[in-house]
Amino acid sequence: MGVFCEPITKVRADLPDPTLPSATPDFLNHDRAPVPDIVVARGLVPFRLRDRPVRGRLVRLGPLAHALLTRHENSREVTTLLGQALALTAGLAAALKFRGSFSLQAKGDGPVTMLLVDCTDSGALRGYARADAERLATLDDAEAGAMLGKGYLAFTCDQGPDMDRYQGIVPIEGSTLAAMSDTYFRTSEQLRTHVHLAAAETPAGWRAAAFIMEHVASDGGIAAPEDAEEAWRTALALAGTLSDAELLDDALTPERLLHRLFHAEGLVVDQARALSYGCRCSRAKLSGVLEGFAPEDLDHMAEEGTITMTCEFCNVDFRFDRDEMRKANQ
């Protein structure tokens, strides 16, 4: 069972609040906002089937899902979609060797106008969804396809300014996020996959999970192509028995769940990876954004001498004194 830290419930009185102006210049203030500090030690568990062209990843966010999904007051349908996107992004990022961040962005003309999630190479997750509540209320279908509408999915690996950025873009096709990701795998990666995503509010809080299984090239363990195909079909049939309830059950460890599915298929469970609460906002970053605005725009943004910037991911307000910013820019 994964080991995790309890969320921060209060800020120590002897520590300064990084969201408020202080004696430290904004461009030097990199302190983390007062947000939950949660690590799920075995949040992602890779696996493979010995001598078969099958590998995969099981993602279980546990209490991390609740901490991420309750930062905003979204509807149940939007929260479910965001939970699935968080688990999917963690699973996709784990398949890559990179330094930086991997992101999933969905932008369409539906009620959910923006969906953005990213995961760093160390497993730090964050995400948010932007939705039109009035349009959302008119939908008869609460599936991802109806909520996102027509648009695109972008999968981006960003390794910093000194490295080329890899991006795959596919149209939004399918009624579920799992179906949409299959389009990406087929068109951009030429890879056959099976993706099962689940997110729901349970008695323990919101939970989110992903099961991603891939058909990989045989490396000599299976001699005949027909044997490889049969092994893949068998794995698909077994994976098809997995339920949302099993995926989201905290009491069912990743190892036990995978053993239920593949105990007779040469299951090998590889080293697990940690996932954590990963918002990276700070006064330094947001003050850098403000520096890009003209003085008259900053004046317009100020209310009673204060500019408030809200992090889209963690929903924390950072306040900047307009007079202090004016002095700093002179």
Image (tube, rainbow, N blue to C red):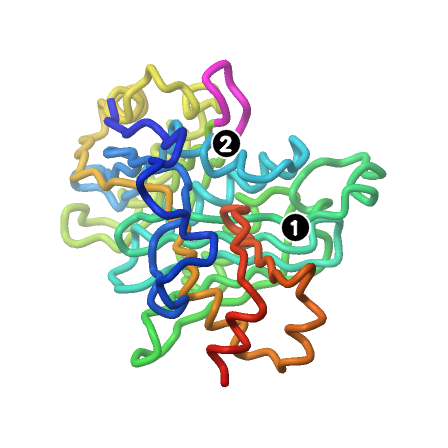
Labels 1 and 2 touching (C-beta < 8 A): no
Q: Quadrant of residue 264?
A: top left
Answer above or below: position of 14 versus 261: below
How crowded pointer 2 is (Cα within 10 Å; few <14, some 14-19, many 20+) is rated as many
Identity of the residue drawn at 23% across and 41% down: 273
Answer above or below: position of 78 versus 316: above
Magenta highlight on residue 212: no
Answer above or below: position of 259 versus 108: above
- Position of residue 241 measured from the top left corner of the image (x, y, whole percent): 44, 23
Q: Kindly identify the amino acid type of the residue bearing the numbered disc 2.
A: Ala
What range is drawn magenta here? Answer: 198-206
Near-viewer residue (153 or 20): 20
Magenta highlight on residue 204: yes
N-term mark: 1 or 2? 1
- Position of residue 65 measured from the top left corner of the image (x, y, whole percent): 44, 33
Q: Quadrant of residue 185?
A: bottom left
Q: Badge 2 is on which residue?
A: 198
Identity of the residue drawn at 40% across and 19% down: 249
Apparent side of residue 124 relative to residue 286 in the rendered image (left or right): left
Q: Kindly identify the amino acid type of the residue bearing the numbered disc 1.
A: Arg
Near-viewer residue (30 or 3): 30
The furthest residue to the bottom? 330
Answer above or below: position of 299 versus 65: below
Q: Badge 1 is on which residue?
A: 130
Near-viewer residue (322 or 53): 322
Identity of the residue drawn at 70% across and 47% down: 131
- Position of residue 143 measured from the top left corner of the image (x, y, whole percent): 68, 38
Identity of the residue drawn at 51% across and 39% down: 84
